Image (cartoon, rainbow, N blue to C red):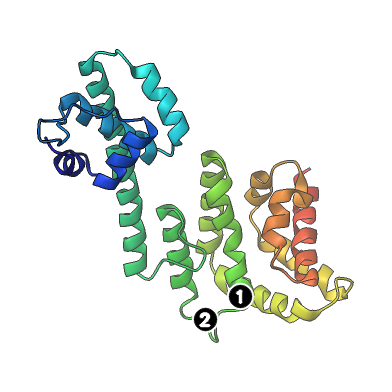
Amino acid sequence: MRIGEIAALVGVTTRAVRHYHHLGLLPEPVRRPNGYREYGVRDVVLLARIRRLTELGVGLDEVRNVLADDAGRDLVEVLEELDQDLARQEALIHARRARLAALLAQARSGELTTEGPVSPRLAELFGDMARASAGLPGPEPAMAAKDRELPALLDTVAPEPEQERLMEAMRRMTEAPGAMERAYALYGELDVLADADPSDPRVEETARALAAILPEDVVTNLGDTGPDDGFMDAFLAEFSPAQAAVVTRALELLMECAR
């Protein structure tokens, strides 16, 4: 087959084929009497191998080493490895499409929040919280959105058992009678403290109110390091000093109760 045919078959450009020839990755094939290159099955396999390796992020120098190790291998073995590579990529694409389908479902139902993309489980919880607060007067407090950042962060970095405990704790808190009303009242108090000094006496009062409604499971999910570890630093980064002081103090109170 001609250079354009092998390039189209493997899914690369003729320029790429010539570049691989120039680098010595793809040996020059025999030429017909008219000067045209004549490619065979082994050339197709080798070119496909080069393409697969580069798609996997392997540098061209590393590709050269891999191909050198492959020299002399049985054609069937190389083809089987190529098939396995394609199967792995197919599985990865399938997983990504499944994740995308979940995100599309969240977006179409209005449950894809600014904290997203999140897991379907957390998206469902956020949806329940949104429905529970739908009848509350006034706009959503600014702190309500920040409060969703903690489970969203845990949803990303926490181990599965910890995620499960947190989701269950939040669900119980959300379903409790008057829970969202109390939470929104507290959010309002936190919004008021946005420009306050951390030494403001309202910080301690608000912290105790926050500790009273937070599930004890939150402390479990934070681990033994307390509120001064890197995880909490990331969570509190967007809070004002007084608001961060409230959250930190509330967690300290919860830990004191848990001891």
Left or right of 72: which side holds 69?
right
Q: Quadrant of the C terminus?
A: top right
What is the CA distance from the residue labelled 2 to the residue labelled 1? 8 Å
Within 10 Å of disc 1 (Cα), the crowding (few <14, some 14-19, many 20+) is some
Q: Which mark is residue 136?
A: 2
Question: Splitting the image into 4 quarters, where does residue 143 fall?
Answer: bottom right
Q: Is residue 1 above or below residue 150?
A: above
Q: Which of 51 and 92 is in front in this view?
A: 51
Q: What amino acid does circle 1 point to?
A: Tyr
Residue 152 x %, y %? 54, 57
Residue drawn 51% across the image and 45% down it: 164
Question: Splitting the image into 4 quarters, where does residue 23 fall?
Answer: top left
Instruction: Determine whether label 2 and label 1 are within 8 Å by CB.
Output: yes
Q: Which of 143 and 83 is in front in this view?
A: 83
Q: Which of 204 and 65 is in front in this view?
A: 65
Residue 13 x %, y %? 25, 47
Residue drawn 69% across the image and 48% down it: 219
Q: Is residue 17 above or below residue 110?
A: above
Q: In which quarter of the image is the N terminus?
A: top left
Report the number of numbered marks: 2
Residue 108 x %, y %? 32, 69
Q: What amino acid does circle 2 point to?
A: Leu
- Which residue does the numbered mark 1 point to in the structure image? 184
Within 10 Å of disc 2 (Cα), the crowding (few <14, some 14-19, many 20+) is few
Residue drawn 80% across the image and 71% down it: 242
Q: Is residue 178 visible?
A: no
Q: Earlier in the sequence, mark 2 or mark 1?
A: 2
Question: Splitting the image into 4 quarters, where does residue 213 fall?
Answer: bottom right
Q: Nearer the viewer, residue 108 or 182?
A: 108
Mark 1: secondary structure: helix
Residue drawn 48% across the image and 67% down it: 129
Left or right of 76: which side holds 127?
right
